[in-house]
Each structure stands twice: as structure tokens, then as C-alpha cells.
Image (tube, grey):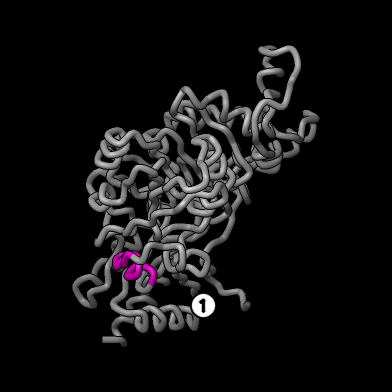
Amino acid sequence: MKKLKYPFNKPFIIGDELEYIQEAISKGQLAGNGEFTKKCHSYFVKKHKLGKALLTSSCTHALEMCALLIDVKEGDEIIMPSYTFVSTANAFALRGAKIVFADSKPDHPNIDETKLEALITEKTKAIVVVHYGGIACEMDTIKELTDKHNLYLIEDAAQAIDSYYKGKPLGSIGHLSTFSFHETKNIISGEGGLLGVNDPTMYERSEIIWEKGTNRSAFFRGEVAKYNWVDIGSSFLPSELTAAFLFAQLEHIEEIQLKRKKNLDQYFKNLKVLEETNNVFCPNIPDYATNNAHNFYLICNSEEERRGLISYLKSEDIMAVFHYIGLHSSPFYENKHDGRELINVDRFENLLVRMPLYYNLSTEDIDYISSKVLEYFSKAQ
Ligand SMILES: *Cc1c(COP(=O)(O)O)cnc(C)c1O
């Protein structure tokens, strides 16, 4: 594929990433759970108010740990949005769960909290929410439901670092939560993720599952005399090299977020006019949510219009992309889905298009990209 001047995403280095990797090497521990891992854990416990934090090799792995921690069994039902990344569902499908897909809200890709109670049955074990684009779901309503029906609440906060719901940091509300540091997210380590554990009854077991089913962490703290195989688990922890890179990024989170938010505001400022002129919509941010500048997208009028925009931008050296084919209509799940139509999922699948947004874009770059978007729509009229 030809490299465009404005790719959709560009990974970046901002601080002491390379020095910290060097430092980890000098210290002589490259395997996981060393000093840099602990520094990252502290950051998240403090800033996202997590009960306990465990770095993982990906958000996908953190989600798989969630399925193990809540003991998903064959036939258990897990309710989640259809409009999400495949890992949200796959982690639970791996344990034999039946995935019950819910629709998005009419005005936002997030799960529609008003449609959830009707999906709860005797077999429901958990509701997994995804804070799409880092924008909070309506958590009060959803938490009331999970409390009432005695269900686990899990937050896929992969895109939601530095974001809040009514002042509460995302990831701190559910029993469990997951974050991603994949190179397309706000804070990156190449591949990488984190599990947040807010239910104290799961603290001990989360560490065991993380350490391949052993009580190795307790052994190193001197709490047990030998370490043993005590439960199922896997190798979910990343090496210190990953943690060193990640910690260097976390030290600069304010600077990163400031720039991303400035660029996002610039997109809004330049493109909000399309709502009036072309019935094309910018992201809708509810009052209860903050915007962590994870992404910027437009909602087009038709698939043709979107296709035209993407190819016009490509001809101007700009890579815009669409995403999330509703999981309920995916080749793997289509014949397992119960047939309910999810009209808002279909709409976002067909009409949403994402613009480039990454740390190294300048205000001038955003202005250039915006001008090409406006050019397309003025011609389309
Ligand atoms: C990126 C993402 C994931 C997967 O994260 P990895 O770290 O790549 O495994 C899961 N869920 C959502 C909503 C995501 O955006």
C-alpha cells in the first residue's frame, strides 16, 4: 500500500522511552513484574482509582482474564455492544459464553442503556460496556441494573484513558476493567494492556491467573514458603521492556492529552458547520462524559457518500478509515445471533468515518485535512 502523507495513525516517542528500556536492561530483569511494571500499576491505581492494577500484554489478554475471573462457563450469557472490537466478545466466547449483542444509542455508538434490561435472563452473568472513543457509557443506569440483577459489570476502557463519567475515572466503576496501549491508542507501548480489579474478593485470584496459575507473586512477597500451581492461568504479563516504554509515556500524559485535545477541538471548530450544510455529524458528547480525544469521526448520510469521501481524501494524501462491522452480523457470529435487528449498529457500521488523529499532527495539519473534507462536501452538494 502506498504511504500517504497523512496516515490514519502514527506511533510516537515523547520522553525517556529508550533510556528507560536501557535502564531496565542494566538492572538485569527483563521478565515481567519488575520496577517499571510496579510504577505503571501505581499510576493507574492513583489516577484511575483502580482497586488493583495488573499490566498485561494486551487489552485482549486483560479481557480474557476477566472471563477467567468471573468463571464464565459454557452457556453463560454475556451482554455487550455489537459495535466494538472483536476482542471484547472473543475473550468470553473462548470460555464458551453465549454473547448477547445489544444495540448502540441512536446518537452515539455506545451501548443503549435503555435496551439492556430486556436482554437479561436467568443465564446472564455479566454486562460488558465499551466506552467508545473514550466517551463514557451511561454508567449510573447500567450499574443500577447490574446491582439489581446481581451481575458482574465489566468496563472495556481500551480507548478511555484520562476520561471520566460524572467525575469518576473510567475503569473504576465496574468490578473489572481493561485498558489498551496498542499503538493506535492515546498512550502506547506497541502492544500492551492493563486489567483493573475493583472488587477486593478478586485481588488474590487476579494475580494468580496473571502469573500462569501460580502463587509466585505471594511467594516473592514472602507470604508463602513455596510457589505452586494453585489455579488455571496463563502468561498474561508483559516484559519490563514494554513496561519501561509505557511508563515513559505515562510521565508525559498531560502533554500528550493537551495536544490531542487541541487537535480534536480544531476538527470540531472546522467541521461542525457540516451539520447545518450537509447533515453530516460530528461526535456527540453527552453532559455526563468527558472527551479524552481518542478519536474524531463524522457520520455521513449514506455509504456511497462515505466511500466517496474516503477516496477523495486518499487522492489528497489523507487516510480516513471506517470500522467495526457489527459483531452480530460477523461471519463467525451471524448464525449464533438471535436475529434481533440492531439498527443503530448497522447505521454506524455504514456511515461512520474516522479522521487521522495522532500526537504528531499540528493545528495546520488538522486545518489542511479539514479543508479537504469541506471541499468534498461542497462538491457533493
Ligand atoms: C483496541 C481495543 C481492544 C484491543 O486492545 P489490544 O490491546 O489491541 O488487545 C479491545 N477493545 C476495544 C474497544 C479496543 O478499542
Residue 365 visible? The answer is no
Q: Residue 354 in the image: x percent, y percent?
A: 42, 66
Q: Secondary structure at mark 1?
A: loop
Residue at 35 percent across and 49 percent down: it is 135
Count of numbered labels shown in the rendering: 1
Q: Is residue 287 covered in magenta?
A: no
Q: Residue 118 in the image: x percent, y percent?
A: 26, 50
Q: Residue 235 in the image: x percent, y percent?
A: 69, 39
Q: Quadrant of the C terminus?
A: bottom left
Q: Main secondary structure of the magenta part?
A: helix
Asked whether, in this view, residue 85 is left or right of residue 122, the answer is right
Q: Is residue 75 above or below residue 304?
A: above
Residue 85 visible? The answer is yes
Give the labeled residue for mark 1: 317
Residue furthest left in the image: 276
Tag 1: amino acid = Asp
Q: Residue 343 in the image: x percent, y percent?
A: 29, 68
Nearer to me, 72 or 249: 72
Bin the neighbour count of mark 1 within 10 Å (Cα to Cα): few under 14, some 14-19, many 20 and up: some
Q: Quadrant of the N terminus?
A: bottom right
- Point out the stretch of residues depicted in magenta: 340-349
Nearer to me, 365 or 80: 80
Nearer to me, 190 or 223: 223
Residue at 51 percent across and 66 percent down: it is 8
